[in-house]
Amino acid sequence: MVNLGDTRSHVELATTPTHTPTAAQLAAVESEINRLIREALPVRTVAVSATDASERPDSLPADYVGTHSVVRTVHIADVDANPCCGTHVTNLAHLQAVKLLHTDRIRGNNTRLFFLVGGRVLGALGSAYAVSRDLTAVLSGGQETFVETAGRLVKESKGQAKVIKTLLKEIAGYVAVELAARVEASGHAEHHREDGDMDYLLVLAGLLKEKGVLVGARVVMLSAGEKAGGGPMMVLGVDEERVNEVVKGITGELDGVKGGGKGRWQGRVKTWKGLEKAWEVVGKVGSQ
């Protein structure tokens, strides 16, 4: 089965787990296809009788009788012959070029082979070259170094993320001490960190639980993320009615509040506009 697609085409191949096209085989097929295109092999159509067994192509279903008992067969020189009712070029040179791309496994054992033909090959080359030029400037090196440079940057990014996570855990320890003191004094506390994330809030919530300050009607609101971009939020407390009251109140002050949970409500907010008003809600409920 062939699908021409909007930007690239694919053909579905009947394969098995142990017999799928290798890179070498695909390269050989692509080379041979383009050789035949350069030779401009002629393409012609032949009408054959659907009732004459000697004339019927092997690929034609046994129960197919055709229109007026005639089957139209498309011949590519002496390379291939298949029944088809579609529109075809008069010779292979009109295809210009074929580029085989990649394969995907589908429907169990079948393989889908993606490819480009004609002007799409040049279009894809132009797009790839433009991206390559942009990446050359961004990565300070030619395309032959892209994979190595990207791999190094990903490794460095992971290392930096690990360091940041460790530092945030240390910061959370100091913040937890301050919040615990505020909760002990007033029955509530609020904390927001723009460069924090949900992991940071979870560490902070765990430290507050260890300190045993979340008792009775006490409530704590924790949040993180840039003011304009929103981010994660948690409301802590053992009194579910108080927690729900806080959530209901801050939902009216913050945009796009979504989340849930018992004892420890957690979710996200679209923007932190109105955060100070939300803190006032926490203070009002926590001071009752």
Image (cartoon, grey):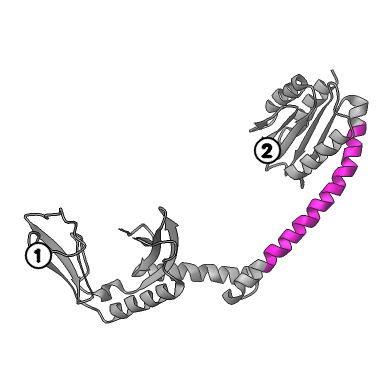
Q: Is residue 135 left or right of residue 84?
A: right
Upstream in sequence: badge 2 or badge 1: 1
Across the whole image, how many numbered discs are drawn on residues?
2
Prevailing secondary structure of the magenta residues: helix
Can residue 197 be spotted in the picture?
Answer: no
User: Residue 188: x and y, percent?
Assistant: 85, 27
Q: Quadrant of residue 184?
A: top right
Inspect the image, locate mark 2, and give the three-letter code of the amino acid beneath it: Thr
Inspect the image, locate mark 1, and give the three-letter code of the amino acid beneath it: Val
Q: Nearer the viewer, residue 207 or 107?
A: 107
Q: Which residue is mark 1?
A: 48
Q: Is residue 258 left or right of residue 114?
A: right
Task: Identify the image quadrant of the C terminus.
Answer: top right
Q: Is residue 248 magenta?
A: no
Q: Is residue 155 left or right of residue 35?
A: right
Q: Nearer the viewer, residue 272 or 244?
A: 244
Residue lying at 41% horizontally and 66% vertically, measured from the top left: 19
Q: Is residue 186 left or right of residue 114?
A: right
Q: Is residue 180 magenta?
A: yes
Q: Furthest-top residue in view?
A: 288
Q: Furthest-front residue in view?
A: 18
Q: Which mark is residue 198?
A: none
Q: Which residues are magenta?
A: 152-181
Q: Quadrant of residue 224?
A: top right
Task: Identify the image quadrant of the N terminus.
Answer: bottom left
User: Residue 27: x and y, percent?
Assistant: 41, 75
Residue lying at 76% horizontally and 59% vertically, measured from the top left: 160
> Please, what secondary structure does the residue beneath circle 2 have?
loop
Q: Which residue is mark 2?
A: 271
> Please, what secondary structure does the residue beneath circle 1 have?
strand
